[in-house]
Image (cartoon, rainbow, N blue to C red):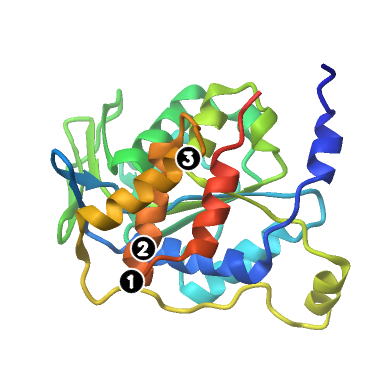
Amino acid sequence: MVRRSVKKEIEDVNSVDKNIIAEFVNISLACSKLKEIIVEQENGEYPLRTNLNLFLYGQIGSTKSTLLKQISEHTGAKKPFTDLSFPALIGSVDGQTRQLIVGASWECRNSILLLDEYDFTKRKKDDMRALLQLIEGGSYSRKLASFSAPVEEKDEDLSYLFKDGTFNITTRFSLILATMKYPYRSQSMEVQALASRSVCLPFYPSSDELYKLGQGYSLFNFVDKTPKKLIHKIKKKDWEKLLKMCQTTKSPNFLRMAGDCARVFVVEGKHREDLYKIILEMGSKRFG
């Protein structure tokens, strides 16, 4: 069997409507503010990570950068990062002043971290591993060879500590990444790991949508979906519904898909079959 070219495979991709992408972005931002999600399971309770990450991909000229810029402007999130190295993500010590420069992982707490045209080929494995660890669990610890005066910042249940050359970070943010990289043909384990922990959304605006943008209309409409309660418990019946639905894909990634659907459910306060369908469709694609 002859495998289709990447170009042909991408041509066959149907872009997700910009209004649906806006819904996912608004939900992602709301998730970044959630303190805890507990799932009632058959055999006890389980803490579910709260952040909903998005992996947006599209061709040159698809206005991905414009979309991220508008998301930042409308939501008050930090401006998109274009080169997020390990020191920029975690923090670093200025070589001359010996003062600590706080990393984006803390600056973007309780919000979204926007990455624009992230070049995976130029990233060191430590950069990717730190990012993966933070979006998976929100905690990071590492000792550096540099020292500065101790720094400790707290924000309710979150904290950023640098002492005796060691970072100890407990943070919370949702990652929204935009790239030209088609994730499903990447041979990089780091890219695959990042995509599998995100809802992948193809963004290929139509000529009409680009024309509307040229007329001054926005690609993104902000709606504050932050729940009144920031600690949630998902009942067993709702979790079982999501679990069984995702299992039907027979994808090895179905547990992560169920988690993403659960986060949508918590923010929306109801089951969103239309959004679930997209999560399952994109999440069940195979790599390689």
The secondary structure type at the circle numbered 2 is helix
Q: Circles 3 and 1: CB distance less than 8 Å?
A: no
Q: Residues within 10 Å of mark 3 (few under 14, many from 20)?
A: few
Residue 52: image location, x then y, percent: 42, 53
Q: Residue at x 51, y 38 (%)?
A: 249
Task: Tell me which numbered mark, 3 or 2, is placed earlier along the sequence.
Answer: 3
Tell me the tag on residue 269: 1
Q: Is residue 48 left or right of residue 279?
A: left
- Label drawn at residue 265: 2
Residue 232 in picture, x, y percent from top left:
20, 62
The quarter holding residue 164 reads top left
The three-letter amino acid code for the residue at tag 3 is Thr
Name the amino acid type tagged 1. Gly
| Above or below for 62 versus 160 | below
Query: Where residue 26 is drawn, which disc sits there?
Result: none
Describe the element under mark 1 as helix, strand or loop: loop
Q: How many angstroms separate mark 3 from mark 2 (CA)?
A: 19 Å
SS for tag 3?
loop
Residue annotated with mark 3? 248
Q: What crowding class fits label 2: few (fewer than 14 Cα within 10 Å), some (14-19), or many (20 or more)?
A: many
Say if mark 2 contacts mark 1, CB within 8 Å: yes
The disc, 3 or 1, on the residue closer to the chain's N-terminal end is 3
Which numbered mark, 3 or 1, is in the foreground of this view?
3
Residue 160 falls left or right of residue 129: left
Instruction: Name the residue located 15 percent from the left edge and 56 percent from the top edge.
Output: 157
- The amino acid type found where label 2 is placed reads Phe
Residue 31 on image: x %, y %: 35, 61
> In whole angstroms, how far apart are the C-alphas of marks 3 and 1?
24 Å
To which quarter of the image does residue 179 belong? Answer: top right
The N terminus appears in which quarter of the rendering? top right
